[in-house]
Amino acid sequence: MLISETQVRVYYEDTDKMGVVYYGVYPRYYEIGRTEMIRELGLTYKEIEASNILLPARSLNINYLKSAYYDDLLTIRTIVETIPKVKFPIKTEIYNQQNELINTGQVVLVFFDAVANKPCRIPEKFRRALELHFKS
C-alpha cells in the first residue's frame, strides 16, 4: 500500500461567505494530493502526458464529514491500495489541524493512450515505481 501526505492551507478563495470551504473545492484538494503522490514516486503528470498517456477521471465519490475553514492547515492523505492495471482507484482522506477526519473520497482514473484514443495498461515505469511500495 502507498500512503502519501501533503498539506494545503485553506485560502480565502476556497471558502464561501461563512468562511467554510466550498464543497466544490475538495476535488482540487484530491488532485493536489495525487499530484504530489506521483511526484514522490519520481514521476510527474507532465512526464506521463509527454509519453502520450493521460489520466482522465472515470468517477468521483466524496463524503463530507466536517467543515474546513479559512486559514486551516489541512493534511491530504492519498492512498493507493493496489497496483492498478487500467483503472487507477485512489482514496483520499483529509484531516484538519486537530487531526480530525473531515472528508473522505475516491477518484478512479483511467490510463488512456492519447495516440490510440483508448484505455491502456499502466505504463511500465509507473508500475515499477508503485511496486516499491507494495513489497513486504
Image: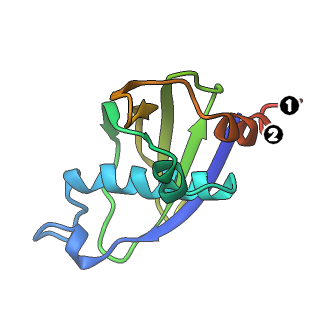
Q: How is the image coloured?
A: rainbow
Residue at x-position 20% and y-position 58%: 22
Which label belongs to residue 132? 2
The residue closer to the viewer here, 120 or 57, is 120
Q: Are marks 1 and 2 in contact (CB under 8 Å)?
A: yes
Q: Quadrant of residue 11?
A: bottom left
Q: Amino acid at mark 2?
A: Leu
Q: Amino acid at mark 1?
A: Lys
Q: Residues within 10 Å of mark 1 (few under 14, many from 20)?
A: few
Q: In the image shown, does 136 or 100 lie closer to the viewer?
A: 136
Give x and y (percent) for residue 87: 47, 24
Q: Callout 2: 10 Å neighbours few (<14), some, many (20+)?
A: few
- Residue 130 is situated, as x and y percent measured from the top left of the image, at 71, 38
Q: Is residue 81 visible?
A: yes
Secondary structure beneath disc 2?
loop
- Distance between the alpha carbons at the discs numbered 1 and 2: 6 Å
The image's mark for residue 58 is none
Q: Residue at x 45, y 50 (%)?
A: 49
Q: Quadrant of residue 72?
A: bottom left
* Residue in the image at 37% along x and 37% along y: 114
Determine which of the numbered discs, if any, sits on residue 135 in the image. 1
- Looking at the image, can residue 100 be seen? no
Residue at (50% x, 22% y) in the render? 86
Secondary structure, mark 1, is loop
Q: Position of residue 105 (x, y in %)?
A: 40, 36
Residue 136: name its quadrant. Answer: top right
Q: Is residue 20 above or below residue 31?
A: below
Q: Which quadrant of the rendered structure holds the N terminus?
A: top right
Q: Is 87 placed above or below 49 here? A: above
Q: Taking 102 as reference, is 77 left or right?
A: right
